[in-house]
Image (spheres, helix red, strand yellow):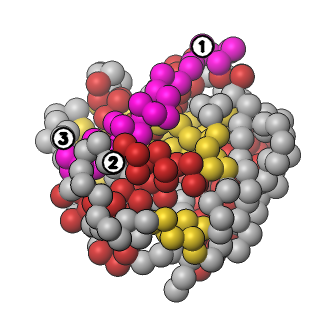
């Protein structure tokens, strides 16, 4: 049985990817340092599986090399990262340590492992590295123009991975994905935050005027794309992963409210509340994902209307998910210390 390492596998995208890989009959080693955004609730369905192994470890720890040599994975998916823009504004250091120093350490250890072992690294990044895309869509050759400390740290990690491919012939691929949504996402992010507030009869905070536009992709579609890239992608290449569907924050909130009304009674306090915008807030992200579609034959299967219904259903059926988190991480509006 082939083995795969997923770093950050207790997180949102990571846990959904672990689930997919297990269904595809891989033995999965989940490496996660178990921070605030990690959640063992996300892996409760398969934590006792004989094909699953959890190891608590920071990718900055050189014991990662021992794990590589012990399990000899056919692939490594790197999703270990600090990801929330608001937190990067409050405390950039965590992002530098995890997203840059951590990736550097991973690359050094993976380089040593690959001297006598065949494997492949899939480094997962973000569309935020491209910065504001006011018109059109950013393709893989588009220049990086990150706006936040988070985006800058991810841009730096992408450049590091790319440099190791060119300098050391490291077998790695870089992916840049648009905004994910779906089951198991930490409520510091917009959609699960709004769902939590709808469930608990609280106002719905929206930055600025709610006109910031993002390209939304259902997390399970993203995971399928990552597996397609692992299976058929070309080493050294960049692949954008997106839905080609943009909605602004106000449109997302209204769609959530409309669908929630069909499931639960909406409380009187559940109203849109415009709050002070965060510093450096990009207006629009939009990806050109033609490459993965034309070269690898991947297409998203879940449109936003279907995806948001599936997402709401999961959170309403898994209210214990919110109880498994620190309340202050849910109720505080991030961006404010």
Callout 3 touching callout 1 (CB < 8 Å): no
Q: Nearer the viewer, mark 2 or mark 1?
A: 2
Q: Measured from the top left, where is residue 31 in percent x and y?
A: 37, 51
Callout 3 touching callout 2 (CB < 8 Å): no
Q: Residues within 10 Å of mark 3 (few under 14, many from 20)?
A: few
Q: Which callout, 2 or 1, points at the residue further toward the start of the chain?
A: 2
Q: Nearer the viewer, mark 3 or mark 2?
A: 2
Residue most extreme to the left: 48
Viewer-nearest residue: 103 or 328: 328
Q: Residues within 10 Å of mark 2 (few under 14, many from 20)?
A: many
In this rendering, the answer to whether 42 lies above or below 82 is: above
Please, what is the dominant secondary structure of the magenta stretch?
helix
What residue sits right under mark 2 in the picture?
A: 260
What residue sits right under mark 3 in the picture?
A: 45
Indicate the quadrant where residue 149 lies.
bottom right
Q: Residue at x 68, y 15 (%)?
A: 295
Q: Is disc 2 placed on a helix, strand or loop?
A: helix
Q: Measured from the top left, where is residue 62 in percent x and y?
A: 47, 59
Q: Residues within 10 Å of mark 1 (few under 14, many from 20)?
A: few
Residue 42 falls within the magenta-colored stretch: no
Q: Between marks 3 and 1, how big is the CA–CA gap?
A: 30 Å
Residue most extreme to the front: 268
What residue sits right under mark 1 in the picture?
A: 297
Viewer-nearest residue: 179 or 266: 266
In magenta, the rendered stretch is: 293-318
């Amino acid at each position: 049985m082939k083995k795969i390492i997923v770093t950050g596998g207790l997180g949102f995208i990571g846990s959904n990817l672990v689930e997919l890989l297990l269904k595809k009959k891989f033995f999965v080693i989940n490496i996660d340092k178990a921070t605030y955004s990690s959640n063992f609730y996300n892996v409760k369905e398969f934590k006792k599986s004989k094909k699953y192994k959890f190891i608590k470890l920071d990718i900055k720890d050189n014991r990662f090399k021992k794990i590589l040599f012990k399990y000899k994975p056919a692939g490594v998916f790197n999703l270990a990262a600090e990801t929330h823009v608001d937190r990067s504004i409050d405390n950039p250091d965590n992002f530098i340590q995890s997203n840059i120093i951590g990736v550097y350490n991973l690359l050094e250890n993976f380089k040593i492992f690959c001297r006598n072992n065949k494997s492949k690294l899939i480094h997962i990044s973000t569309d935020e590295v491209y910065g504001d895309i006011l018109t059109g869509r950013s393709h893989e050759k588009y220049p990086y123009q990150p706006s936040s400390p988070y985006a800058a740290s991810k841009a730096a990690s992408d450049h590091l991975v790319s440099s190791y491919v060119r300098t050391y012939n490291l077998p790695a691929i870089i992916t840049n994905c648009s905004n994910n949504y779906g089951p198991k996402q930490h409520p510091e992010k917009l959609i699960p935050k709004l769902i939590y507030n709808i469930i608990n009869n609280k106002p719905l905070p929206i930055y600025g005027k709610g006109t910031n536009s993002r390209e939304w992709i259902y997390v399970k579609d993203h995971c399928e794309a990552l597996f397609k890239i692992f299976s058929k992608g070309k080493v050294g290449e960049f692949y954008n992963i997106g839905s080609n569907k943009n909605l602004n924050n106000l449109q997302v909130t209204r769609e959530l409210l409309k669908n929630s009304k069909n499931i639960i009674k909406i409380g009187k306090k559940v109203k849109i509340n415009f709050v002070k915008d965060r510093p450096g807030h990009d207006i629009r992200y939009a990806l050109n994902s033609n490459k993965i579609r034309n070269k690898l034959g991947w297409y998203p299967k879940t449109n936003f209307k279907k995806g948001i219904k599936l997402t709401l259903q999961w959170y309403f059926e898994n209210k214990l998910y919110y109880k498994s988190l620190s309340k202050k991480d849910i109720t505080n509006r991030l961006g404010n210390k």
